[in-house]
Image (cartoon, rainbow, N blue to C red):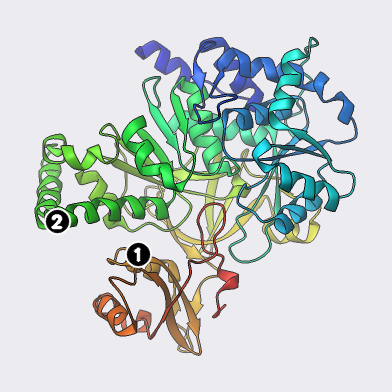
Amino acid sequence: MGDNVAIKKASLTYPDMRCLAEHAASCFPDREFFLCADEEMPYVRGSELFGFCKKASAALEEFTAARHVALLGPGSAAWLAAYFAVLSAGRVIVPLHDGLQPPELEDCLRLADCGVLLYDGRRGETAAALARAVSGLRLMELHAFLEKLREETRESLPKLEPQAAAAMYFTSGTTGRPRCVLLTHRNMGSQISAIAQVIPLAETDVGLSLLPLSHTFEMMTHVAGALHCGGTLYLNESVRTVKKNLREKRPTILVTVPLILQTLHKEILNTARKQGRLEQLQKAIRLSGSLQKLGLDMSRRLFGEVKALLGGRLHTIICGGAALDPELIRFFRALGIEVLQGYGITECSPVVSVNRPGKNVVGSVGRPLPCCEVKLDGREICVRGTSVSPGYYKDEKATAESFRDGWFHTGDLGRLDRKGNLFFEGRIKNLIILANGENVSPEELEEKLYQAEGVLDAAVYEKDGRITAELFVDRTLIPDIPAAWRIVSPINRSLASFKQIGEIVLRETEFEKTATRKIKRYKLKGS
């Protein structure tokens, strides 16, 4: 991509998401976007996507009273085409997480007052059950809806008021029932404009979508980024296909959450261990890190085989959603892969801050985006700006509690350094307050536990006055509690005495998680 084109794209501002689709149609009319395994619609071209947007208003006339349209199904080009079409028609799109159980989906549909459900044919039985359970809910299969758009001859682009609702997203629900967050056209437009300014993307970039499309983080980074720069984005089918798709699609950039990054890290170490080359890899990591401090990058020569596990071309990973161990960032940097840690929350569309290439402050979540401003109220992170939601749908009490004096109070703990870099220090609701008055962030301990061999997942909480670590482990490596203590004891020795783990619980099953792979803490025994 030429320099002039790069500058032009970086300076673009989008009033709303429809303008992003229009940009893609204008600059990349024949580009194949959102490549996926759906045989009916393996991709959507830029011109076709905006064509759907122009016809959606007329095609949705039969659902005049249904302003809120829900979307259910696995990630696909058809899912994304419907998303942009509905939003462009001035309706409110309500993405539903495909992994939710029917009772949870019912709650979401009722909470958001959805009158229409667009569903992937593979979710036909679920859709029919929801129609029986939710009074007045009308159904339309996703591909049938898009075919209707193709046949529609009328075109119109209704005016999208900046402050009008564009989408409703449900919070992750780690500490209780999810809330329905309103996002306006201005919220979403300012978010994608800001991200385009700070994250350098090129037509040559290839992404692999690993997160649910129903989550704002994936939508505003990977999806919007591809349309903005004309890059290639493959949609991963399932957890089982991640390793295969990394090798075959050979991404240059990933957007992910800490759990997936930790899994990739362990996969690299386990592969080296099986080959009898773990010590060799660890020495090479230390050597590469030392050389990089001297301005010498030997990562390609040292780690060709290792990087081949990730496709061989990966240069950037944008990671957010939870705390991340700085050592993990240093590990991937030694491999020649820059991890840009960020911080976001659904109510802020979602990205609040992110590290920039060349200005990556390891341990921080970077500086705020141009669309928002951050301050600390005590230790609580507060945000205001054009990307901040007006509040929760039909929940005045929760809105009044969290949106006060022009600021959104996130419920997250943090600190700012002198240069304006933000450091995330955990959730206020998760904070363990001990009898002696000391405060312990469970996220800090969980990050250390995640790095231990054999620990697949971990949650830390207070139970009967003791800090308890509940672990889901590989039983071939950690068969019992004494074996678990052999992992935990060295971690304890690295911690202040008041932070040390006093009890271990081994789980037989995985933790129940949210759409973004966060543990639902309110379901833990100690919560």
Q: Earlier in the sequence, mark 1 or mark 2?
A: 2
In this picture, residue 331 sits left or right of residue 507? left
Q: How many C-alpha atoms fall within 10 Å of the one at disc 2: few (<14), some, or many (≥20)?
A: some
- Which residue is the site of mark 1? 450
Name the quadrant of the N terminus.
Answer: top left
Whether residue 54 is visible, yes or no, is yes
Q: What count of labels does the image hold?
A: 2
Q: Which residue is rendered at x = 36% and y = 21% of the image?
A: 204
Q: Callout 1, which amino acid?
A: Tyr
In this picture, residue 382 sits left or right of residue 406? left
- Return the mark for residue 278: 2
| Front residue (pair 290, 45) | 45
Label 1 sits on a secondary structure element that is helix
- Return the mark for residue 400: none
Q: Callout 2, which amino acid?
A: Leu
| Front residue (pair 43, 513) | 43
| Front residue (pair 411, 146) | 146
Q: Position of residue 168 (x, y in %)?
A: 71, 43
Please say if 158 is above or below 96: above
Please say if 119 is above or below 170: above
Q: Nearer the viewer, mark 1 or mark 2?
A: 2
Q: How many C-alpha atoms fall within 10 Å of the one at disc 1: few (<14), some, or many (≥20)?
A: many
